[in-house]
Image: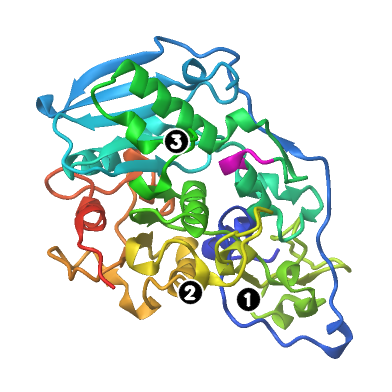
Amino acid sequence: MRVLSTYTIALFTLIFACGGDNEKPAEVPDAASIGVDISVDCPAADIKLGTAVGIGPCIDSRSVGGGSGTELLVRADCTDKNIAGLLDKKHLVLIPTTPTRDTLWVHFGGSGGQPTNTENIGSAAMSSGYRYISLAYPNEPSIGSRCSCPDGPRPADCPGLVRHQVIYGSDISPYFNMIASESIENRLMALLRTLDESRPTEGWGDFLLPNGGPDWTKMALSGFSQGGGMAGFIARDHLVQRVLYFSKASDGAIRALVDPATYQACTTHSECAFGICCTASDVECDTPPEDAYCLESTAGPVASQGKDTDGDGIGDGDASTRATPGNRQFAVVHRLEFSFVFSPEIFESWGMGTPEEFIDADSNDPPYDKSARLFSTALPPRSDCSEHQSMGADPCQPRAPNGQPAMRKVWLHAMTAPLTE
């Protein structure tokens, strides 16, 4: 039986869900130079509905931080009667007693995550003067599940079109079924309207445009894993105040899916640069089948796209035309997780800095240079969590000696550092 390293298995098992890398592909033989389309199709994935009716009060309120703020748990179905998916997840809202910033901080959790497991990042935002929302959005199933079929990957445009539909509600994706009211944009608008009506002295309506849409220019974003990709997609199309990515900010794909001309048929693992000669539906094959090919990976199309100017869901121009410039974006990645293979390349293309500019947050404490935007850690996860998970949910995050999340110092820098050119 062929034995793969844990890292290799994790990397290729999660290519569709979480990305790939930008290593040079193995040499393509002449016979394959015309390219082979490896994409397949299958019935569209559906949003996970979960419980049929929300549970508990529409807005549950309690004091937090020793009286320095208020926490609200808000049922999504109470903000819009047309919202029916994932009602076991409630919006988490944190409000400092005296907000000192006019910017709203909005966070997007990872696949399957609960907003209530993002209180640590919310606490940092609140202590920095922001009002904070961890939005309950359609984060199930994962992007990988929506863009994979039993026999292999969907076309390379799948992640971008799915993300556009999830964010804006536009029915432009043939790969995912979801009504517009479930979108990130509608859920956020409905929540802001509800907060403005129930707490009229706090100015929640200031974050809405005259037409009722979210005013992204008055918001800062953060996201973990799938949520990082949502934040990165929004920052592509809208100028936001700042962004903080946990682990990743865009999707990856098998290189031959993005560029069929790089398809390399193979019969043994030794023929491939990464030693993986299988099919996308079986990335751990012991003996390569007759239709095997090299599973090199690369950043997906969305990573290299600029602002979508024509509304078709596909970004126009290149990464240099993204709406949010690199000096407003920050990132922290675990060096032992799969995302560290490809995320630095993406961040560099977005003008955030080179891979060599990553700061080891484990051995460097603040104050950081105001231009510092890229950070990494190798601290072990808590509990039975993976390195990737340690960047997201509260129970998985490594702790500093004072009991606070070890990366809180990085979060605070990203939230408060003066923005440089």
Q: Main secondary structure of the magenta part?
A: helix
Q: What residue is shown with label 2?
A: 349
Where on the picture, by quarter, is residue 353? bottom left
Q: From what the image shows, is residue 249 above or below residue 163? A: below
Residue drawn 60% across the image and 60% down it: 309
Work out whether residue 166 or residue 50 is closer to the camera in this orientation and state it.
166
Which is in the foreground here, disc 2 or disc 1? Answer: 2
Work out whether residue 58 or residue 30 is closer to the camera in this orientation and state it.
58
Give the number of the disc on residue 409.
none
- First in sequence: mark 2 vs mark 1: 1
* Label 3 element class: loop
Farthest front residue?
210
Residue 156 position, x and y percent, is: 72, 61
Estimate the spatial distance between the alpha carbons at disc 2 and disc 1, rounded to whole Å: 24 Å
Residue drawn 79% across the image and 47% down it: 150
The span picked out in magenta is 166-170
Q: What residue is shown with label 1?
A: 274
Q: Is residue 212 left or right of residue 156?
A: left
Residue 197 position, x and y percent, is: 36, 18
Residue drawn 57% across the image and 22% down it: 83
Q: Is residue 169 left or right of residue 285?
A: left
Residue 191 position, x and y percent, is: 43, 26
Which is in the foreground here, disc 1 or disc 3? Answer: 3
Q: From what the image shows, is residue 151 above or below residue 73? A: below
Q: Is residue 22 left or right of residue 400?
A: right
* Label 2 element class: helix
- Crowd class of label 3 (few under 14; some 14 to 19; many from 20; radius 10 Å): few
* Label 1 element class: loop
Where on the picture, by quarter, is residue 63? top left
- Crowd class of label 2 (few under 14; some 14 to 19; many from 20; radius 10 Å): some
Q: What residue is shown with label 3?
A: 210
